[in-house]
Image (cartoon, rainbow, N blue to C red):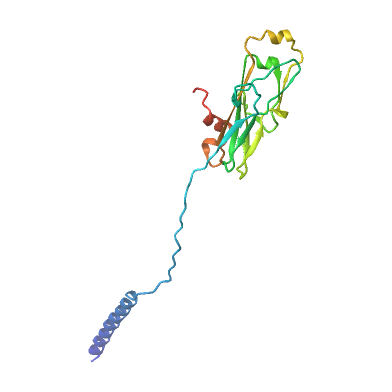
Amino acid sequence: MFKKIKELNKSKSIILTVTLVIVLLLVVGTTYAWLTSRTTLLSNTFTYGDIEISIRESDTNDGDEDLNTNSYVIMPGANITKDTKVVVKANSEDCYLFIRIDKENDFDNYMTYSLESNWKELEEYAGIYYMEVDKSGEEQTFNVIKDNIIKVKTDLTYADIRNITSYPTMMISAYAVQRNEDMDAINSPKEAWELAYNPAS
């Protein structure tokens, strides 16, 4: 009889075990409604920036009607008005603004001048000067020659001037390169100039 009771208890254990497994299966198989969320679509548009510059000065009424080829009369001690300006158009991106000054035919032997103080010399390249210009909704204008004056040296004589066979010449050109600290290729004025102008070309 004890044997039968023992077998019956064993059978109950098996039944209980099976029941637990079924309960577990029922729990695992139950579908839950999870909390969910979704954002709206984020749309980004990437456009190019732009920089636009120009260079200009007043006409000297030398008869050629070309502001890029002004002529001046030199006399010992004379002050010559040269109001060269570089213009950065409205909404141009942050930039390095450069001027390049080339002089020919012994220009410095006859005349002296200074640049406006906001132009910094680019030490690695002779005759190159720059400034950093921030983006603005307004047009920005920068003078090149201090007080717009080039002075003829006072120690020149009329004989010296009459003996000039090739007239002294000054040529000024302007360049601009986007300034952006996140762009490794142009994170210094030197690197920007090397992109703007290739001396080998």
When the figure is inspected, residue 86 is found, relative to residue 138, above or below; the finding is above
> Hey, which quadrant is residue 174 in on the image?
top right
Q: Residue at x 51, y 26 (%)?
A: 198
Q: Is residue 64 left or right of residue 12?
A: right
Closer to the camera in the image, 174 or 72: 72
Q: Is residue 162 visible?
A: yes
Q: Is residue 21 left or right of residue 108?
A: left
> Hey, which quadrant is residue 139 in on the image?
top right
Residue 36, x across and y down, in percent: 43, 69
When the figure is inspected, residue 89 is found, relative to residue 79, above or below; the finding is below
Q: Residue at x 29, y 82 (%)?
A: 19
Q: Quadrant of the N terminus?
A: bottom left
Residue 135, x across and y down, in percent: 60, 43
Residue 110, x across and y down, in percent: 70, 15
Residue 50, x across and y down, in percent: 53, 40
Q: Residue at x 68, y 27 (%)?
A: 145
Q: Seen from this angle, which residue lies furthest bottom?
A: 1
